[in-house]
Amino acid sequence: MTVTRTRVARARGVSLALVALCVPGIALGQPALPIDAVPPKTPTKVNPAPPPAPSEPEVAPPPEPVAQAAKRPEPAAEPAPLTKKEKEVVKAASPTPIVPSPKNPLKPAFQLYAEYDIPLVAVGAVIAAGRLALRGPAKNCSLAPGRDPENDPVCTDADKLNAVDRPFAGRYDNNWATASDIGTLGLSAALVTVLVVDEGPLPALNDFVVVAQSVLISTALPALSTISVGRPRPYLYSDKAPASLRSSSDATMSFISSHTSVAFAATTSTFMALRRLEPKSSLPWIELGLGLATSGGIAASRVMAGRHFPTDVIGGALIGSSVGIVIPAMHRSPVQIVPDLGQDKKSAALVGHF
C-alpha cells in the first residue's frame, strides 16, 4: 500500500513539473489548477511602424488665362546673321526705290520703283504711239457710189447706228475739236500746278509720274480699241469734213475717245494723290468736282466736233476713271505705319526711305 502511494505521489509531482514548464506563471510545488480554470493567453498587440510623413507637394502656378496667353508672344529664336552671299542676293532681289526728296520723304504721295515704273511708262508710250503708224481709207462702212474710196470716202449706212449715236452721224465742227484740245491741255496743266503748290517741285514730279502712267495707259487702251474695232467717226457720214481728213487713218478711230479717257484718268489719279497728301482737307474733293466737270465738258466737245459718238465718250470716261484709280492704288506710300505689339506695350512705328 505504501509503495503504491509513493508511486502515485511521484507521478503527481512529475505531472506538476510538466504543467509548470508548459504553463508560465505556475510555480513548482503549487497545487495544480483545473484545466478549465487556466486563463486564456492574451495576444500581444504589435504597434505598426508609423508611415513616413508625406512630403509637401510642389504647388504649381495657377494656369494663365487663355486670352492673356494668346496675347503673350512666344520668345523667338535669335535669327542667324546673313552671310555676305545672302545679303547680295537679298539686295539684288529688292526693287530700287526712286526718292526725289531725301530730306522730306513725307511729301511724295507715291513710292516709285525703277524696276516697275520706268518699264510701265515705256510700254504705255509705245502702245499709245502705235495709232500714229496707221494710214489708209475707211473700210468699215458702206461708201457712197461715185466717190473715190481712197481720197474722198463718205459712209451712207447711218441707219445701222444705234438710237443714241444716230442723231450725231455726219456732224463736223473743227472749233469744238480745238476747244477739246485746249481743255485737255489746260486740265493737265492745272492738275500739275495743284501738285506743285501742295508738295513742292520734286515730290510733285514724283507723283506726276503716277498720273502720267494713268494718262498713258488711258491713251493706250483706246488706241488698241480703235485699231481693232475701226469704227468710222461721225464726220465720215457726210462730206462736211475735208477730204484729207476723211481719207486718213484717223477717220476710223472713233471708239473709244482717248481725249475723254485721258481727262478722266488725270482727274481721278490726281485726286488719289491729293487724298493721301491731304486726307482731312477738302482740297481733294474740290479738285475731283472741278476735274470731273471739265472732263465732262471735254467729252461733250468731242461729240459736238463730230470726232466721237456719245457711246465713244462714255466708254472713255469709264476706262479713264478706272485706270486713274487702279494705277495709283498699285503704288504704296513711301511711309507706312507698322504696328509693334510687345508683351507689355502697344505702339506703332513709321517706316520709310530716308
Image (cartoon, grey):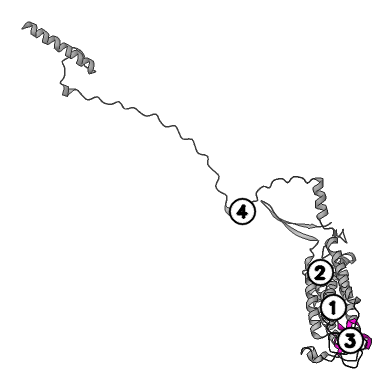
**For the point 42% across and 32% down, which residue is it?**
51
**For the point 16% across and 11% down, which residue is it?**
13
**Residue 258 percent location from the top left of the image:** 85, 78
Work out whether 107 lies above or below 297. Answer: above
Q: Nearer the viewer, mark 2 or mark 1?
A: 1
Under tag 4, what secondary structure?
A: helix
Determine which residue is flagged by label 1.
227
Q: Which residues are magenta?
A: 231-252
Q: Quadrant of residue 183?
A: bottom right
Task: Work out how far the residue at label 2 is from the one at label 1, CA to CA, in angstroms.
Answer: 32 Å
Three-letter amino acid code at the position of disc 4: Ala
Residue 275 visible to an observer of this rendering: no
**Crowd tier of the residue under label 4, counting other residues whose Cα lies within 10 Å: few below 14, some 14–19, many 20 or above:** few
Determine which residue is flagged by label 4.
70
Give the quadrant of the N terminus.
top left
Determine which residue is flagged by label 2.
273
Work out whether 181 lies above or below 216. Answer: below
**Residue 315 percent location from the top left of the image:** 79, 80
Of mark 3 and mark 4, the one earlier in the sequence is 4
Task: Work out how far the residue at label 4 is from the one at label 1, CA to CA, in angstroms.
Answer: 60 Å
Three-letter amino acid code at the position of disc 3: Trp
Three-letter amino acid code at the position of disc 1: Ile
Q: Nearer the viewer, mark 1 or mark 3?
A: 1
Task: Work out how far the residue at label 1 is from the one at label 3, CA to CA, in angstroms.
Answer: 24 Å
Rendered image: mark on residue 53: none
Rendered image: mark on residue 176: 3
Of mark 4 and mark 2, the one earlier in the sequence is 4
**For the point 82% across and 86% down, which residue is it?**
309
Of mark 2 and mark 1, the one earlier in the sequence is 1
